[in-house]
Image (cartoon, rainbow, N blue to C red):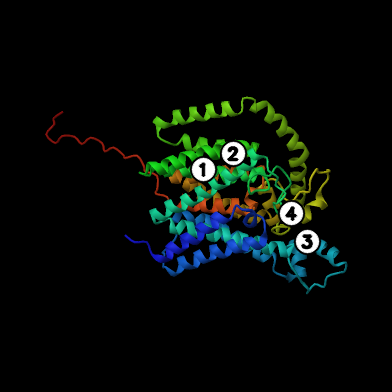
Amino acid sequence: MSIPSGKTFAWAALGLAILLAPWPAGSVGPVAFHGLAVLVALAAVALGLSNPGPLPRAALPFLIGLLAWSAWVFVQMIPLPASWIALASPQAYHLHVQALAAAILPERPIPISLTPALTRQELIKLATFTLAFAVTAKISAEPRLRTRLAGILFAAAGAVAVFGLGLKLGGLAFAWLPARHHVGPAIGPFANHNHFADFVAAPALVGLSLLQHRSNGLKLMVVSALAIMGLALFASGSRAGLLAAGGGLACYLLTGKTRTRLGWAGFSVLALSAFAPKLPSAWLARVQEDFFSVRWPIWNSALLMSGDFPWTGAGAGSFAAVEPAYSLLQLPVAAGHAHCDYLEWLAEAGAPVLLVAAFTFAWGLAALAGGFRSEDRLTRGALAGVAILLGHGLVDFSFHVPAVALAAAVLLGLAVSGPPAATPPVSNPRRPDPGATC
């Protein structure tokens, strides 16, 4: 059965966006990100013209949450009457007055966001990720396109791993990287090793589904790529990234077939022992220092910021501009992000929208939990990849890096389009023999 040309074009456009996203121009520069947004939008238009039909039911909770979030970000940057802003967000009104150095007339429109230009950029990103999720969920209804899309994501992660590992081993300089998100150990095309680890680890388990292919050559390539990605992950030195990857791997292994669980788990323990014999003591010391010197001061600022903007938030993308006013401790570096995606969302979007999004995503993830019991390796791998990113988001800002966020949208789309988990058959009670006598 032939695949409609619209779906094929949508797959190609989205695949090209995935391949371009991790490189510096795609993951850092806002102008270059607009190019990725155009590719994703073209994929959505081509898919819409091909009359694709409805989305999978499993995608609806996530789509509701993303659309509600996008709508609120749009409201944040719309100029509204100043009297409304004074009522909904007194602190935002006060800061707008300070910025203009004059009293604002009640009828003068001002936005909720303290940084409307940055909020507009965040809206473009959020709309792009929402479209990428919807396009992935829809075109993955075709099993062949679903496998190909997973292969592209796995290939992009493998290319990033090869490049990063090569630069790491070669000791080359990273001065050519543009406008970094955060100062820190750069590796590969990413300006921070934590985001490199996320982009490598999250799609890695998707590659295990490719081992079902009949071609021995492809199987050898996948195994080799997985080995390189594992080495690159360890070479990155990302503590939280390795822990999150270990948790995702555990989710994947412990839900597989019984005869493969112990073997894979034993291999993982041996690999950890071989690569990091002094891992616990070294990590605990570094984690303690990093927490008290960097993360806790920034988290404290985020909590204070969210206390002043509990209902409306300060505006998507405004954290870097507003945080210095709430910083009580001297930081070694400027806090461009909260180093916790959830706290940053709370400070920028406000509690009501965050609660709506959290409810819809929890609803969707609960419905997808059966996917971990599925025999479909691609579904299990995609869910494990999402789990890796959700776990790492507790201590970092990976979802604020466009390349990682795009990978998360694609992984979630692959997960919701998978076949449902098989339910164990219910045995029928033994029927009594009509001719039997008591």
Mark 3 to mark 4: distance in Å?
Answer: 13 Å
Say which residue label 1 marks.
Answer: 204
Q: 352 or 303: nearer the eye?
A: 303
Q: Amino acid at mark 3?
A: Ala
Near-viewer residue (150 or 110): 150
> Which quadrant of the view contains residue 9?
bottom left
User: Hey, what amino acid is under mark 4?
Assistant: Phe
Q: Earlier in the sequence, mark 3 or mark 4?
A: 3
Q: Which residue is mark 4?
A: 319
Residue 341 location (% of width, % of height): 66, 48
Contact between marks 4 and 1 (CB within 8 A): the answer is no
Q: Split into 4 quadrants, where in the image is the N terminus?
A: bottom left
- Image position, residue 379 (x, y; %): 45, 46
**Picture disc at residue 233:** 2
Quick check: can you spot residue 7? yes
Of badges 1 and 3, the one in the foreground is 1
Q: Quadrant of the C terminus?
A: top left
Q: Please report whichever mark, 1 or 3, sits nearer to the chain's N-terminal start.
A: 3
Earlier sequence position, callout 4 versus callout 2: 2
Circle 3 packing at 10 Å, graded few (<14), some (14-19), many (20+), is: many
Q: CA distance from mark 4 to mark 2?
A: 29 Å
Q: Amino acid at mark 1?
A: Ala
| Image position of 67 with respect to 251: above or below | below
Q: Nearer the viewer, mark 4 or mark 1?
A: 1
Q: Which class describes the residues within 10 Å of circle 1: few (<14), some (14-19), or many (20+)?
A: many
